């Protein structure tokens, strides 16, 4: 059983490495349908592996326990990666309705308040009163903000700031800014940011910003970044509005 499990892990990491090399070379932000099929199919054997490892952990000699725990952590990490990939696929289905960006930003502030306080980072929201509603999928937009705010908080040290703001920009746009005072980015990094699997974090999957870009393109919105090393980052989103929303 153990050999079978190791085999599966090796097989998965081989497939994953192949895709990674291929898409790093292609420098594309689009992922093929077959990758999502593989991701979907990998989830069943992975659940089986997890259940079996948990059983093994109960029966094995104590000296084996740390090794099994390590395997369990890796299985969880793979599962997370597959979930993120499948999420990327899911965002393609949007349900559009009028959305109040100002309230959404306030909701985000509430959601992240605990994490920000724990990190001793100040999280503030500035939103112009009476900005028109945008036409969008609220759940997807939340998902987009969560990824951007999570990154902004992760980039900050104690004492840093994250500022979320929204304003109406004539004639027909909403400008949203997610600004932080964190580590910032050099020019080379800025060119890589939205590429799937680009990450500088030990535990990152590098899919957060790919998901953000996908969601925004489905809303005909754009995102740009302004940054310098050690001078923080500002992500600027331009959202089209239609005056009948
Ligand atoms: N606000 C930011 N400040 C500095 N670097 C950032 C910021 N946002 C993103 N990055 C850089 O862009 C990379 C890609 O971000 P992305 O959100 O796609 O993946 P990730 O955060 O590494 O992993 P995850 O998939 O868990 O989100 C990060 O690893 C980091 O190097
Ligand atoms: Mg991220």
Image (cartoon, helix red, strand yellow):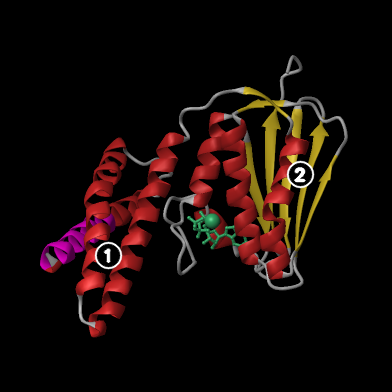
Image location (x, y in percent) of residue 95:
55, 24
Q: Is residue 231 visible?
A: no
Seen in the image, is 41 located left or right of residue 206? left
Disc 1 target residue: 54
Question: Looking at the image, is 14 positioned above or below residue 100?
Answer: below
Furthest residue toward right: 129
Can you tell which mark lies on residue 43? Answer: none
**Which residue is located at x 75 percent, y 68 percent?**
160
Q: Main secondary structure of the magenta part?
A: helix
Q: Which residue is mark 2?
A: 106
- Direction from residue 85 to residue 174 in the image, left or right: right
The range drawn in magenta is 3-18
Q: Is residue 189 left or right of residue 3?
A: right
> In the image as oriented, which residue stretches furthest toward the front?
59
Residue 200 visible within the image: yes
Q: Residue at x 37, y 61 (%)?
A: 77
**Image location (x, y in percent) of residue 89:** 40, 37
Picture residue at 73% right of the left edge, 18% below the top: 245
Q: Secondary structure at mark 1?
A: helix
Q: Quadrant of ligand 1?
A: bottom right
Residue 56 vertical placement versus 142 (above, below): below
* Residue drawn where x is 68% and y is 55% of the image: 112
């Amino acid at each position: 059983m153990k050999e079978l499990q190791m085999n599966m892990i090796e097989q998965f990491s081989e497939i994953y490495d192949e895709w990674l090399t291929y898409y790093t070379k292609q420098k594309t932000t689009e992922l093929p349908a077959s990758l999502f099929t593989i991701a979907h199919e990998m989830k069943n054997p992975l659940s089986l592996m997890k259940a079996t490892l948990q059983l093994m952990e109960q029966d094995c000699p104590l000296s084996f326990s740390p090794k099994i725990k390590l395997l369990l952590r890796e299985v969880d990490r793979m599962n997370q990666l597959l979930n993120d990939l499948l999420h990327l696929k899911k965002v393609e289905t949007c349900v559009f309705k009028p959305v109040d960006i100002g309230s959404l930003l306030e909701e985000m502030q509430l959601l992240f308040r605990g994490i920000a306080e724990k990190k001793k980072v100040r999280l503030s929201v500035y939103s112009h009163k009476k900005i028109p509603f945008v036409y969008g999928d609220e759940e997807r937009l939340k998902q987009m903000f969560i990824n951007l705010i999570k990154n902004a908080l992760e980039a900050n040290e104690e004492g840093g700031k994250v500022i979320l703001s929204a304003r109406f920009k004539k004639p027909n746009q909403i400008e949203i800014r997610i600004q932080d005072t964190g580590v910032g980015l050099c020019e080379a990094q800025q060119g890589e940011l939205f590429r799937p699997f680009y990450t500088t974090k030990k535990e990152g999957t590098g899919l957060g910003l790919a998901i953000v870009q996908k969601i925004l393109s489905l809303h005909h919105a754009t995102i740009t970044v302004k940054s310098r090393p050690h001078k923080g980052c500002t992500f600027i989103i331009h959202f089209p509005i239609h005056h009948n929303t």
